[in-house]
Image (cartoon, rainbow, N blue to C red):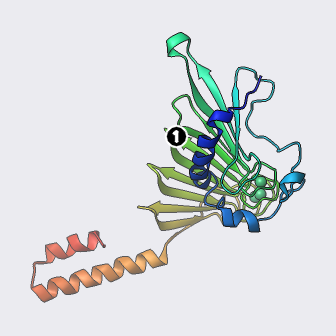
């Protein structure tokens, strides 16, 4: 049986605003909600919200779960759902947030869902960021940190950009440019900046050509030149010129 915590609702509603922004990649501000598209079957008139909000949390017919419905910032009806799981027995009994989903553009259709592990760390998120009724961003977390972001940019419901993160920093992007569902461009990042790009020209799934990012190359050369000029001006030995060149910035 699902329950509503009216006593907690006010507190949770306040928290929902802070949580809504990271959960939907910044698309959930109040201003944005007014101007956004309406998903098929939804309505910007809260009195005409559909009975089925297309829940993505798995809670129906699961009486062991607790469900909280709250009103987020700018909403007139509950648009945030939290699903809690209870662990342990007796004094060790505690509940943790297992799933949270939000209707960020207030059209009555849930458009972002995030799941959490027993420690309360984020596991997975799916979002319909353009509110066309189809998921277009998928996030995976490792130890609560973003590890992978898949994006559907051509609205076919399938990812065509795959971004990989290590320790929260962008490391690689794979892109499918010809729509066959397989990557044909590989971008390698260093310290969050594009370093080189590999391209599969003949569609065999392997890189045929590696291009070093021209901008990065230019900046490295400029830094090297600057360091060389600086050492020449100061009359420093040649060895420090090599050190400076190896570490632009
Ligand atoms: Ca929505
Ligand atoms: Ca979408
Ligand atoms: Ca796609």
The quarter holding residue 192 reads: bottom left
Q: Quadrant of ligand 3?
A: bottom right
Closest to the observer, 167 or 247? 167
Residue drawn 82% across and 59% down? 132
User: Residue drawn 63% across and 25% down?
Assistant: 85
Is 204 rendered above or below residue 237? above
In the rendered image, the residue lying farthest to the top is 90
Location of residue 163 with respect to 141 vertically, above or below: below
Residue 100 picture quarter: top right
The x and y percentages for residue 179 are 77, 61
Quarter of the image with the C terminus in it: bottom left
For image coordinates 63% across by 45% down, the residue present is: 13
Residue at the spot of label 1: 142
Number of labelled discs? 1
Q: Is residue 190 above or below residue 102?
A: below
Graded by Cα atoms within 10 Å as few (under 14), some (14 to 19) or many (20 or more), the crowding at tag 1 reads some
State the SS at label 1.
strand
Q: Quadrant of residue 65?
A: top right
């Amino acid at each position: 049986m699902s329950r509503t915590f009216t006593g907690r609702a006010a507190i949770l509603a306040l928290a929902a605003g802070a949580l809504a922004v990271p959960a939907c990649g910044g698309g959930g501000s109040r201003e944005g909600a007014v101007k956004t598209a309406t998903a098929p079957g939804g309505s910007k008139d809260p009195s005409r919200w559909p009975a089925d909000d297309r829940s993505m949390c798995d809670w129906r017919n699961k009486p062991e779960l607790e469900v909280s419905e709250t009103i987020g910032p700018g909403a007139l009806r509950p648009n945030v759902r939290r699903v809690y799981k209870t662990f342990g027995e007796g004094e060790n009994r505690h509940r943790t947030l297992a799933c949270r989903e939000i209707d960020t553009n207030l059209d009555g259709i849930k458009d972002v869902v995030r799941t959490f592990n027993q420690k309360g760390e984020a596991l997975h998120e799916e979002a319909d960021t353009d509110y066309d009724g189809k998921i277009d961003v998928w996030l995976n977390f490792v130890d609560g940190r973003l590890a992978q972001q898949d994006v559907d940019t051509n609205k076919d419901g399938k990812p065509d950009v795959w971004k990989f993160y290590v320790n929260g920093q962008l490391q690689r992007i794979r892109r499918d440019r010809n729509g066959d569902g397989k990557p044909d461009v590989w971008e390698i990042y260093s310290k969050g900046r594009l370093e080189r790009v590999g391209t599969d020209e003949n569609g065999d799934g392997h890189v045929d050509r590696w291009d070093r990012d021209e901008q990065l190359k230019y900046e490295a050369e400029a830094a090297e030149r600057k360091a060389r000029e600086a050492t020449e001006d100061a009359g420093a030995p040649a060895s420090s010129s090599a050190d400076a060149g190896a570490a632009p910035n």
